[in-house]
Structures are given as C-alpha cells and as structure tokens.
Amino acid sequence: MRDSLHWPRPPHALPHARLGDPPQGALICVAGLVLVRQRPGTAKGVIFITLEDETGICNVIVWQNIYQRFRRAVVAGRLLRVTGKIQRDGQVVHVIAQHIEDISGLLDRLTGPDNPIATKPAENGA
C-alpha cells in the first residue's frame, strides 16, 4: 500500500493523473474544467460530472442530497473544485462528491491584465 502522506489532502487539488495514489475511501480534492454533466433518467437523481485538468480526466458522482446543497455550482460551474472520497471498481476510479465549489472566476485570470502569460496585443505593422 502506498504511503498516504505522499498525496496532497484537501484543499490542495490532486492532479487527475495521480488518482491511483490515495487509498480506497481517502478524502481528496480535485479540480478541473467541466467536460460533461449527465443526469440519466435511470440514475434516480444521481449526476455524473467529468472534469479535466492538464493531466487527465476525473469522474465525479454527485448524489441527490449533495446536488441540492451545491446546485448552483453543479449546474452553472465551468471550473469546479470537488472534495470527496475515492471509490474504485477495478480500473475505474470515481470521486464521490461531498463538497462542490464553483471556481470559474479563476478562468478570468488567464486573460486578465495581471496574467504574465497573457498574450500582448499585436503591434502596428506586425
């Protein structure tokens, strides 16, 4: 078993490529862009969210009671931070959401004037 001290704990987000590191049932935090929200009619109110970061994707399961508490973030968030427990079934890994935070406002920083990597406007004659 891997040492649980070698992976960040909430509120530090675990890169999706490292979802295999924490032990089953560990409380972790992940963050990423929302790729997909699914609410199948056969899932009895369960919502499935797929998040993406620069290292891969993460599957998040949102039970109905958690959805009710964090509805606005689940419905409108473009960038989410999710705290929950790791659940594994073979090679399939899910995060069972306990807390969901909409951090979409951080996306504005990518193009804001204070961002050192934001591209400068083209100069005349360029």
Image: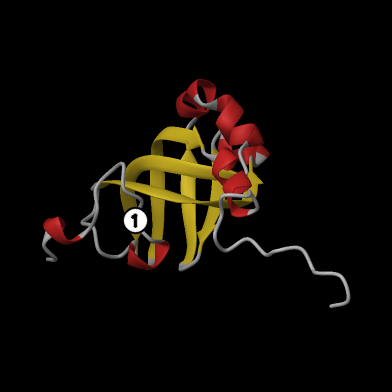
Name the foreground residue: 38 vs 22. 22
Specify the quadrant that holds the C terminus: bottom right
| Position of residue 16 in the picture relative to residue 32 (left or right) | left
Q: Residue at x 53, y 22 (%)?
A: 68
Residue at (67% x, 64% y) in the render: 119
Q: Position of residue 70 (x, y in %)?
A: 51, 26
- Farthest residue to the front: give it: 124
Q: Nearer the viewer, residue 33 or 85?
A: 33
**Which residue occupies the foreground of this view, 125 or 36?**
125
| Residue at the outermost bottom position | 126
How many marks overall? 1
Q: Is residue 98 above or below residue 1?
A: above
Position of 83 with respect to 24 (left or right) is right
Task: Name the image colouring.
Answer: secondary structure
Tell me where residue 5 sits by quadrant.
bottom left
Image coords of residue 113 (percent x, y): 63, 50
Q: Secondary structure at mark 1?
A: loop
Could you tell me which residue is drawn at 22 percent across and 58 percent down?
7
Q: Residue furthest right?
A: 125
Q: What residue is drawn where x is 46% and y is 27%?
A: 66
Across and down, in percent, residue 21 comes to 25, 64
Q: Quadrant of the N terminus?
A: bottom left
* Horizontal and vertical percent position of residue 55: 46, 68
Mark 1, Cα crowd under 10 Å, few <14 / some 14-19 / many 20+, is: some
Amino acid type at image mark 1: Leu
> In the image, 82: left or right of 123?
left
Residue under pointer 1:
14
